Image (cartoon, helix red, strand yellow):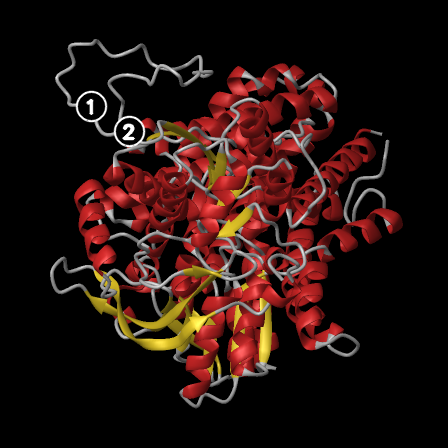
Amino acid sequence: MRIRRATLWLALLAALALVASACGDDDPEPATDAGQTDAVQEPEPATEPEPAEEPAEPADEPEPEPAEEPAEPADEPEPEPVVVGGEVKVGMITTLSGGAAYLGEGVRDGFQLAFDLDGRYELDLVIEDDAQDPAVGQQLADRMLSRDEVDVMTGIIFSNVAGAVVPQVVSQDTIYLSPNAGPSPFAGAQCSENYFVVSWQNDNPAEAMGEYVAGQGFGSVVALAPNYQAGQDSVNGFKRNFGEVAAEIYTELGANDYAQAIAQIRDADPDAVYFFYPGGMGIAFVQQYVASGLEIPVFGPTFSFDEFIVDAIGEAAVGLRNSSFWAPDLDVPANAAFVEAYREAYGTTPTGYAAQGFDTGNLLISALDANGGDPSDIAGLRAALREANFDSVRGDFEFNSNNHPIQDWYLLEVVQDPVHGDLTNTVVEVILEDHADAYAAECPLGG
Amino acid sequence: MQLFVEQTLNGLQLGFTLLMVSAGLTLIFGIMNIINLAHGSLFMVGAFVAADVGGRTGNYAVALLAGTAAAAVVGMFVEFVLIRRLYLRDHLDQVLATFALVLMANEAVQMIWGTRPGGVSTPAFLDRTVTVFPGLPYPAYRLAIIAAGIAAISSLYLLVDRTRIGMWIRAGTTHRELLGAFGVNVRLLYTLVFAIGAGLAGFAGVVASPFLSVESGVGDNFLILSFVVIVVGGIGSLKGAVYGSLLLGLVDTWARTYLPLGFDGFLDASTAATVGASVASASIYVVMIVVLVVKPNGLFGLPDG
């Protein structure tokens, strides 16, 4: 019987693993009992910038955090900064491990930099790694809302994590500011007055690229993306402005081996390839694409061509074109100051993710300024956020009726940075001006 | 036709990678009656050590040796400290104990190497394409994985089938006590078998790592697939592992290619692509269920006795 029993054991384990992975994808149901806490990593202290310690707490500010450092001695020589509203407690659930760790790090560092440069608010940032797992994200959100009692939440990179976490946050009358993911359901019928997307709606970068690729006269295009909400949004967005594609290829989210997809591209033999692979997926895809000997031109949103990904291709990447709301050399005064400050603080050129984090921070600061610095006044904060009265690093920025941005989309090209020597993206031209997303009409807000 | 050839090569490459993991798993089960969930962690150890050593030396051969050796040594250590206490326990105890090892290993590699994934780059002489079929260039490294898989499994087969140690190993599966009575050090033999299985898993981890982001838990996926392989092939059967892994490697690859096309007939192209991709990822489990219904002990499993 031992063989039979062992066979059943293994089959059972494999089946459980399948069920667990299926529940992890795009599952809006609460799955807080999934037992994934072991995967949660505290961010490494060495890489986390400490919030600036205030010399003295405002006396009227209740301090519920037991782990607070002991009060600074009164004879500290630092001058007291001008504090408008005191403390704001922000819960940040983001991706800080695995192939997409640098996405979350960019958002985190940009957000922190906004508060550091402003210097007037004491930012209490509760930051946790979601490990790209929706179930982990939900657990963290539970904890931040009930135990840490954060004022505002932000940080999520991946749309499947956002899909699980955002409804839970906004339904508890807490404001969520998205620094990255902009899944289409939340832009349309499921929009919320407590949900603001500072980055873009997922379809937007793809719409810009579709517009450009169509204008270049490419007839047949194969579109590739991971099989999850943002991947589907990206392909839909591309088709919205390009027209029908020759084939759509969906790969597993987080996959690292693209041999099968590359064989399908070779078989379809298109004029051009559009792909959406952020983070580690992008690095794996472009390396294997280059190694496969395929020479069909590739296009994509800037997430597929960020500094980390083009670095993996090397000099062959120079000249590759992609679409973005921003580039390090975008000619906007607020942007020049941001890029310089970021370089000084972190030693690298900021990625688009850092720009998104920075804008998210500044949007929150502008709203706090407008409501007298009271993060617990949700209605006031909400009204102030809608105004979007901040200097965005991308220039013009305003919120549509569904709290998603209306902004310009640019064509970028990979170049060798003339000063620093590394590969980076530069602005070529505007593709879409004052572009809004396609779902705002379905959103009952603002009507 | 060209698509079929390329996807078949991809399927074989996946199959041989799986085979290197599942051969060790099935060998260890066949001889010691141990379900070792930590086998995927040994794959991970191989990949991490190779990424580290490869990053320092820039030499693929050194990285390959280091990764394989590290996995074998860690395997021996684990066998010595933990596994040998589990031989006579039932499967539930084994699953719980080795699952704890998986959790510890995943945390340990994050403590040692951090959360930023590394990787091994392909050796320069394999960093090119070979025309395997008119108009079809194929990466040489992927062909090399197939060759490495054939070499590793042939050596294992020769070891088990043609050497004295192999004779002891085969005797150990059925006549453990008798083997001891003949003066063979069974404990040492078990440690050796465990080290061989671990080394194979580590070797697989290294050769697969150019296509992996080497991060915590990287072996877990391969472990789950290996379970399916040895359930399909028959637990404890090396021959079963060979057929099982090649079958599943090909089924998985073909399903991912042709299922989305199959759904095209009655769904619109976009839905067919997403649904096809989702259904394809379950294809190997369908194979597993069919095999379990038809042959409950797997294709080459020993009959219950």
Image quarter where the N terminus of chain A lies is top right
At mark 1, the secondary structure is loop
Q: Is residue A393 left or right of residue A12?
A: left
- The alpha-carbon separation of the residues under discs 1 and 2 comes to 8 Å
Is residue A212 visible in the rendered structure shown here? yes
Query: Based on the displayed image, in which of its 4 quarters is residue B103 positioned?
Result: top right
Q: Position of residue A164 (x, y in %)?
A: 63, 44
Q: Amino acid at mark 2?
A: Val
Q: Amino acid at mark 1?
A: Glu
Q: Name the residue carrying label 2.
A: A83
Is residue B137 visible in the rendered structure shown here? no
Q: Is residue B278 positioned above or below A78 on the image?
A: below
Q: Name the residue carrying label 1.
A: A80
Image quarter where the C terminus of chain A lies is bottom right
Q: Are marks 1 and 2 in contact (CB under 8 Å)?
A: yes
Mark 1 surroundings within 10 Å by alpha-carbon count, few (fewer than 14), some (14 through 19), many (20 or more): few
